[in-house]
Amino acid sequence: MRQAMLEDEFRDFQYSVSMTTRKPRPGEVNGRDYYFVSKAEFEDNIKNDQMLEYARYVDNYYGTPLKYVNQTLDEGRDVLLEIEVNGARQVREKCPDGVFIFLTPPDLGELRQRIEKRGTDDEATIDKRMDKAAAEIKMMAHYDYAVVNDQVDLAVQRIEKIIESEHLRVDRVLDRYEKMIGAVK
């Protein structure tokens, strides 16, 4: 999903690379897929308020480094965060104007098949992931939108439409037009 969202060079948003203490999966690249760090380094980032959000998920830390997000927003670009529900709650507290999209599998059976197909987790870890997914789905009501990730291309199109619609909301463009009218007087 992430790769499909970033393939179009004309999209004016950036994907925020998360930081994690988990080990890289085959083919993952540090700095592209995640910043893979030690537990001590991650905890230093927390202590120094360098994380927009963070959480423990299936025995590892995951989080969003604050510096990159702030730089990108200062450039006037949107930032996509791929985070779990506790992280989203933290971001909503810090960024109430953010747009929160819950990406959900078609059903839990499909999710289990996707995780098993990766071949990177043992049965106990898969069970933990499934329990976590079920708990997260219950939190969907705290999001602005829900997109079913049944077919990647369709899910990407739905997310693009949400982003485009959010850019057209009156409360997001009103200042620009009020300045335009003020300049005419």
Image (spheres, helix red, strand yellow):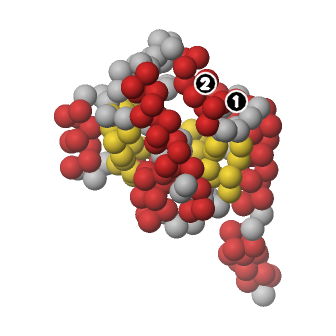
- Residue carrying label 1: 4
Is disc 2 surrounded by few (<14), some (14 to 19) or many (20+) residues within 10 Å?
few
Q: Nearer the viewer, residue 101 or 150?
A: 150
Q: Position of residue 41 (x, y in %)?
A: 23, 34
Confirm or deny contact between disc 2 and disc 1 (CB under 8 A).
no
- Residue carrying label 2: 114
The answer to whether 151 is drawn above or below residue 90 in the figure is above
Q: Nearer the viewer, residue 151 or 126?
A: 126
Q: Is residue 11 visible?
A: no
Q: Residue at x 41, y 19 (%)?
A: 122
Callout in the foreground (2, 1): 2
Q: Position of residue 61 (x, y in %)?
A: 33, 38
The answer to whether 57 is drawn above or below residue 143 in the figure is above
**What is the C-alpha distance between the residues marked 2 and 1?**
17 Å
Q: Position of residue 96 (x, y in %)?
A: 52, 67
Is disc 1 surrounded by few (<14), some (14 to 19) or many (20+) residues within 10 Å?
few
Q: Which mark is residue 46?
A: none
